[in-house]
Image: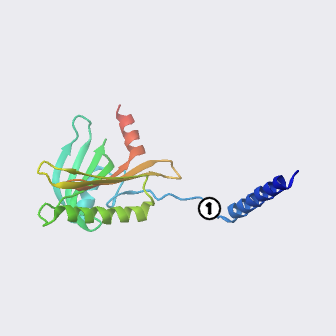
Amino acid sequence: MNKMQVFNLIVILALLSVSVVMFSCRPQASVVQVVPEGFVGVPWGASRDQVIKIMRERGYRSLGTGGIGGSGAVVLNFRGEFTTVPCSLSFILIDDSFYEGEAMFYRPDMPQPNKTLQTTFDNIDGMLSEKYGPPRERESSSYKDKEGIDRPSKSTFWYLVDNKSSDIYTVQVMLDYYVTVYYRACSLETRLKNKNY
């Protein structure tokens, strides 16, 4: 071997040694993913009566009941709060079992609704990032509405897997005309839909 080959071999061995030492010093603890146990205090799988009872106990006013066109899903609507901010809350149920929640914030009465909604989005996005970690997706753009006003459009999306059950959950916060937060127990939704078909 010539001197250059020996030098290259020494450099490669030194780099491998450093890598082994760095890897062996890193903690090997398993990462535990935090997943939502429900939405605004209502556990996944709660019945219609349980959702109504929990909302009444919290002093939230019912805004009525609806459905999602031919899907068999029932939507219970309330005036309530998400992260202490007033909003409308929706609970979607199939087969009398809650699997998706939605909080919608809209303040057109504010002097600068875009700024108010942006602040609401940023606060919720920060809170969810702190709780669930970095999001899987983050999108940001803007557009002009029919009145020619520049509107921001943002979305942050978390895809969460329970390490124990492998159940999948999604959480999303969106900014458009509204700020909307969606929580969904995807695996439960699949089980409920398969049960009915």
Instruction: Depth check: give the residue in front, 59 or 130.
Output: 130
Apparent side of residue 106 relative to residue 165 in the rendered image (left or right): left
Residue at the spot 13% in from the left edge and 51% down from the top edge: 148
Residue at x 36% of width, y 65% of height:
126
Q: How many labels were placed on the picture?
A: 1
Tell me if residue 20 can be seen: yes
Residue 21, quarter of picture: bottom right
Mark 1 neighbour density, 10 Å: few (under 14) some (14–19) many (20 or more): few
Q: Amino acid at mark 1?
A: Ala
Instruction: Name the residue beneath numbered marker 1.
Output: 29
The residue positioned 30% from the left and 54% from the top of the image is: 154
- Which quarter of the rendering shows the C terminus? top left
Circle 1 — which element? loop
- Residue at the (23%, 53%) spot, across then down: 176
* Residue 167 percent coordinates (x, y): 47, 47
Residue 149: give x, y in percent of width and height.
15, 54
Asked if residue 18 lies left or right of residue 36, the reply is right
In the picture, measured across the screen, residue 160 lies left or right of residue 177, that is right
Q: Viewer-proximal residue, 5 or 46?
A: 5
Query: Looking at this rendering, what residue extends furthest in the bottom direction?
Result: 84
Q: Position of residue 56 (x, y in %)?
A: 22, 62
Residue 48 horizontal/vertical position (percent): 27, 50
